[in-house]
Image: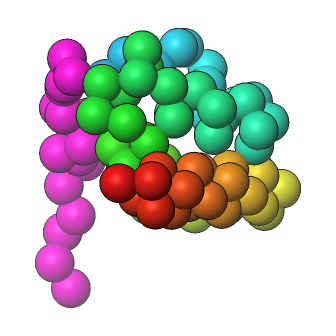
């Protein structure tokens, strides 16, 4: 069995292209979706917010409680609706 490194690469990921407010992923689904769809938070729009939310869920892994995961998945569904609406306008 291989020895697992204690350092995780995700801890070193830094980006200046997104500006989510602190504690955003601890809020309710509607607030998360609304914030991630905002051009102020993510200049590239809700598609970028969807990728950020998916990334967060994947990185949190087993550390998320079932209730928190459900809330984040609900936010993902709401954000997905916004992405589809935006694409249908184009």
Q: What residue is at 18 percent from the left and 69 percent from the top?
A: 3
Picture quadrant of residue 25: top right
Q: Residue 70's x, y, as percent?
A: 77, 61
Q: Residue 86's x, y, as percent?
A: 46, 50
Q: Residue 19's x, y, as percent?
A: 37, 16
Of residues 10 and 40, the one nearer the viewer is: 40
Asked if the stretch drawn in magenta spans residue 10, the answer is yes
| Location of residue 37 with respect to 23 vertically, above or below | below
Q: How many marks?
A: 0
| Location of residue 52 with respect to 18 vertically, above or below | below
Q: What residue is at 44 percent from the left and 42 percent from the top?
A: 46
Main structural element of the magenta stretch: helix, strand or loop?
loop
| Location of residue 52 with respect to 54 vertically, above or below | above
Of residues 3 and 78, the one nearer the viewer is: 78
Which residues are drawn in magenta?
A: 1-17
Q: Quadrant of the N terminus?
A: bottom left
Q: Residue furthest bottom?
A: 1
Q: Quadrant of the C terminus?
A: bottom left
Note whether residue 70 is visible.
yes
Relative placement, left or right, of 12 versus 58 is left
Relative placement, left or right, of 48 versus 38 is left
Asked if the stretch drawn in magenta spans residue 78, the answer is no
Note whether residue 55 is visible.
no
Q: What residue is at 83 percent from the left and 56 percent from the top?
A: 67
């Amino acid at each position: 069995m291989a020895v697992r490194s204690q350092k995780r690469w995700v801890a070193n990921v830094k980006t200046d292209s997104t500006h989510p407010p602190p504690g955003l992923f601890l809020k309710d689904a509607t607030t998360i979706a609304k914030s991630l769809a905002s051009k102020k938070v993510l200049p590239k729009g809700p598609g970028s917010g969807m990728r950020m939310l998916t990334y967060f869920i994947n990185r949190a892994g087993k550390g998320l409680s079932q209730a928190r995961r459900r809330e984040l998945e609900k936010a993902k569904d709401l954000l997905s609706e916004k992405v589809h609406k935006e694409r249908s306008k184009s």
